[in-house]
Image (cartoon, helix red, strand yellow):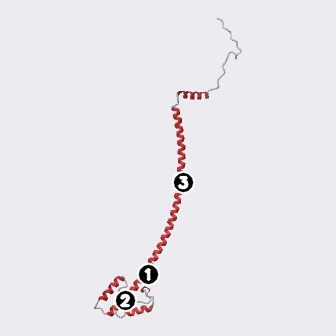
Amino acid sequence: MALKPDDPCSGFRHGKVVAFINEKMARHVKGPEFYLENMSLSWEEVEDKIRTILEDSEMSSQAQEACAWSSLALGVRFARRQGHLQGRRVQWLHDFAKLHKSAAHALASDLKQLGAQQEMERKEAAFQLRLAQAKLAEVQKERDLLRWKLLRARFATPRESHRAAYKGSQQHQLPARTPITAQSHDRRILPTHQ
């Protein structure tokens, strides 16, 4: 018996169907041999072999029919295997899509956090720039004032320079004394004789 009723890889679910196909394959020794020899081949290779058998005029029709039933059983087996592989591929794609979605969510969260951090850094940099500009304006104002004083001192007329010097010297002098006059003393001025 080539097909086993308890083999889940055969592709057949009903024991009666398996028994019928086994009976048809067993009508010639080539039937079960064909099934067992070609289980690992691809469907295209099996189909090429069955075509060669069917075109062989020296092979009996009983052997050809047994091999045809074997190729049918192999076709069902390959379809079952392909369905199983396809199911695994679909599951893999489903898992991959979930992983991709999870990674996309994590990336979106990271991007949002990075954007918020960059916004804070931008605001901090803008504040530091405004502070530096204010300090620069203050220094420039002080520079301009010192430059103005320097130019004023350099190009002042001699009269203005003397006036400024005189004003400065008056501020440092003591108050003026009252002059001594003859009237303020009780002395008489006597005429001198010659």
Q: Which residue lies furthest to the right in this view?
A: 186
Pick out the residue farthest to the top. 194
State the residue at coordinates (57%, 27%). Answer: 163
Residue at image position (44%, 81%) is: 84
Direction left: furthest residue? 58
Residue at 43 percent across and 79 percent down: it is 86
As measured in the structure, the alpha-carbon distance from the residue carrying label 2 to the one carrying label 3 is 79 Å
The quadrant of the rendering that contains the C terminus is top right
Q: Which residue in the structure is indicated by mark 3?
A: 124
Q: What residue type is labelled 2?
A: Ser
Where 36 falls versus 171 (above or below)? below
Kind of residue at disc 3: Glu
Q: What element carries label 3?
A: helix
Mark 2: give few (<14), some (14-19) or many (20+) Cα within 10 Å: many
Residue at the disc numbered 2: 70
State the image quarter where residue 2 is shown: bottom left
Instruction: Identify residue for label 1.
Output: 84
Quadrant where the image shows the N terminus? bottom left
Residue 152: mark in rendering: none
Nearer the observer, 81 or 177: 81
Q: Quadrant of residue 46?
A: bottom left
Instruction: Pinpoint residue 132: horizontal percent, then vertical percent.
Output: 53, 48
Q: Is residue 163 visible?
A: yes
